Image: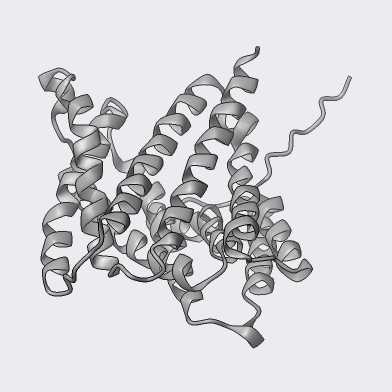
Amino acid sequence: MSNITIGILLLVAGNFFASLSDVAVKALQGDVQPFQYMFIRQLFSLVLITPLWLKQSRTQKKLQQKSITLIRAHLILIGSGCMVMAITYLPLATANAVFYTAPLLMLPLSFILLNEKPAAGKVLATIIGFIGVLIVLRPSQFHWAALFALGTACTLALFNILVRKLPKEQTVITTLWWTTILSLPTSFILTVGYWQPISHTNIAFIALSAALILGYNGLAVLAYKKAHSSEIALAEYSGLIFVALFGVLWFDEIPDWITLIGILLIVLPLTPFKKRKKS
């Protein structure tokens, strides 16, 4: 089995886990405050990551670029809070279609923040993608929760752009551990004022969501180490297929053909096409 095939399988498995995480959030049915969700999920994430962080050498454990990591930690909080609202009140396929615009948003943000000048083809692809977003959201049937879905996409885009500011020698485990622990003080302060009784079932759903997202992150890292991103990135969008199927099976959410066209317009610009070499 080639490295590309292995990479694709790892990414598909990772997106399957991420889609199940969305199902776990949807299953909360709005009974858990977003601030509670943020704090409990980050706490469980810390418990899961800490044993891996402790196994590293003292040098590997050290945090670099503290200010960037602190910003990214709070972007996680904003994004996860927005994600809870979006998934709770929108169909899974609709919410995720908007989440997947994060790579499109990275283009204008990288121009503003990193002074990167995009090629004309990328600009055109981004415009097509945003037309797809408008089709999915349909302004005539606009739901306020779509703003939270866009908020998640924006935080994801910023989160990914700021990765470029981190030193390459810093391990993924160290980055995840410090990002998680730096998010806890703010999430704790926010949740104190909004704390409400929470059932063991809902705690289990949040813990499951945390574990599944960490599983996705780990599988994604392994996948991109096996093959170049341009060769396997398309497998990332298997998540849209999974959430659409889960929406139909468990929540009776059947996307119409207009939504499917919009999703197609979002995904196509992100598809890595290879140019044929002249013989």
Residue at point 65% right, 49% down? 241
| Residue 13 in the image: above or below residue 21 | above
Q: Quadrant of residue 196?
A: bottom left
Residue 80 image offset from top left, x and y in percent: 35, 59
Indicate the position of residue 117 as horizontal and vertical percent values: 53, 52
Q: Residue at x 62, y 31 (%)?
A: 232
- Left or right: 262 as drawn, with respect to 81: right
Q: Identify whether 59 is placed above or below 68.
A: above
Name the side, left or right, on which 259 lies relative to 62. Answer: right
In the picture, residue 78 is in which quadrant?
bottom left
Q: In terms of depth relative to the viewer, which is nearer, 256 or 204?
A: 204
Image quadrant where one finds the N terminus: top right
Residue 76 visible to an observer of this rendering: no
> From this viewpoint, which residue is outermost toward the bottom?
140
Horizontal and vertical percent position of residue 167: 27, 33
Depicted 118 relative to depicted 274: above or below: below
Residue at the front extreme? 200
Is residue 240 in view from this perspective?
yes
The one nearer the camera, 213 or 236, is 213
Q: Quarter of the image containing the C terminus? A: top right
